[in-house]
Amino acid sequence: MPTPLKDQLKEKDQEIVRLRTQLEHQTRKKSGQIQTLAKMSQTIAQGIYIREILQLIVTMTAEMMGSKICSLMLVDDKGRDLKIEATQSLSEEYKTKPPVPVRASVSGRAILEKKPIIVPDVAKDPQYTYPDIARKENLRSLLVIPMMIKEKSIGVLNCYTAEVHAFTDEEIQLVQAVANQAAVAIEHTRAIEKALAAEEALETRKVIERAKGILMRQQGFSEEASFRLIQRQAMDRRKTMKEVAEAVILSEEIQQKK
C-alpha cells in the first residue's frame, strides 16, 4: 500500500478516535447536567427553606456550567433594583456589592427585555456596573437569564466565565431551565409565606379581641380604651400587641384557678 494512502488511513483512524472521545465526553457531560437538573427538581419539591434552595441552585449551576461565578439576583418590591440573594462566590467584595438599578445595568436589561443577555467581556462593557470587581475577580463573559413567573420577570441568574466564552444555544437553554425552576421555587415559597402571614394576622386579631374583652369586663373600659391600653403597653415594653394580649389572658386564667 502506498505510503500516502497509509498516512491518510492513519489520520482517519486518529480522527475517529478523537471524535469518539469527544462524543463520550459530551455524553458524560449531558448525563451529568440531566442528573443535576433532576436533583434540583427533587430538592425544590422537598420544600426546604428558600435560602438553601437558592444557594444550592447557584452552586450546582456553577459546577454544571463550569462558571467562575454564578449568582441569583431578585428585583426589589419597588421594581427598581436587583440585589444578590445567592452566590457560590467566596469573594466578599462580589457578595456584598450594592444592588444594581434595573434600568441602568446589564442584568436589568434581561429583566426589561425578558430574554437572555450575553456580554462577551464585562470588563469592556460600558453598561456593566462594577468593571473594577470584574477585573479583580477575573470575570470575562457573562450570561444573564431572566427568571419569569408567567409574564413577569422577578430576577435573573448570572453565569460568569474566567475566559472569553461564546455561550451556545444548548448552554443558554440549560441555564434557562434552571432559572425556570428557581422561579417556581420562589413563587411557591412566597405563596406559603403569604398564607402563613395571613394565618398569623388572624391569630393575632383573635388574641387581641379576647384580651380586649377581658379588660372591658374586668376594668370597665370601652373597646377603644382597651385596644389603646394594649397598644400603649406594647410600645412601652417593646413587645408585640399579641404578646401583651397573651399576658392579659394568662393573668385572667391564673386568677380563675385561685
Image: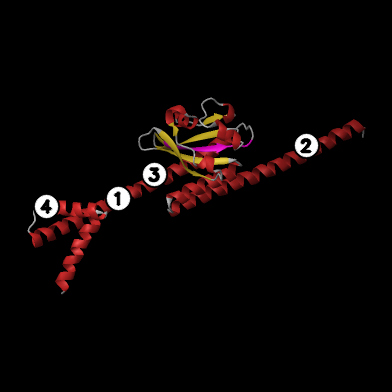
Marked residue nearer the N-terminal end (1 or 2): 2
The quarter in which the N terminus is drawn is top right
Tell me, yes or no, whether the two marked residues, 2 and 3, touch with CB atoms within 8 Å.
Answer: no
Label 3: state its secondary structure. Answer: helix
Total labels drawn:
4
Task: Name which residue type carries label 4.
Answer: Ala
Residue topped by disc 4: 225
Residue topped by disc 3: 187
Task: Name which residue type carries label 2.
Answer: Glu
Q: Which residues are magenta?
A: 154-162
Packing grade of label 3 (10 A; few <14, some 14-19, many >=20) is some
Residue topped by disc 2: 15
Task: Name which residue type carries label 3.
Answer: Glu
Label 4: state its secondary structure. Answer: helix
Residue 254 picture location, percent across and down: 18, 70
Label 1: state its secondary structure. Answer: helix
Q: Nearer the viewer, mark 4 or mark 3?
A: 4
Front-most of residues 65 and 129:
129
Residue 143 picture location, percent across and down: 54, 34
Position of 248 with respect to 119 (left or right) is: left
Mainly helix, strand or loop, the magenta region? Answer: strand
Packing grade of label 2 (10 A; few <14, some 14-19, many >=20) is few
Front-most of residues 143 and 245:
245
Marked residue nearer the N-terminal end (2 or 3): 2
Q: CA distance from mark 1 to mark 2?
A: 63 Å
Task: Name which residue type carries label 1.
Answer: Ala
Residue topped by disc 1: 197
Q: CA distance from mark 1 to mark 4?
A: 27 Å
Position of 113 with respect to 69 (left or right) is: left
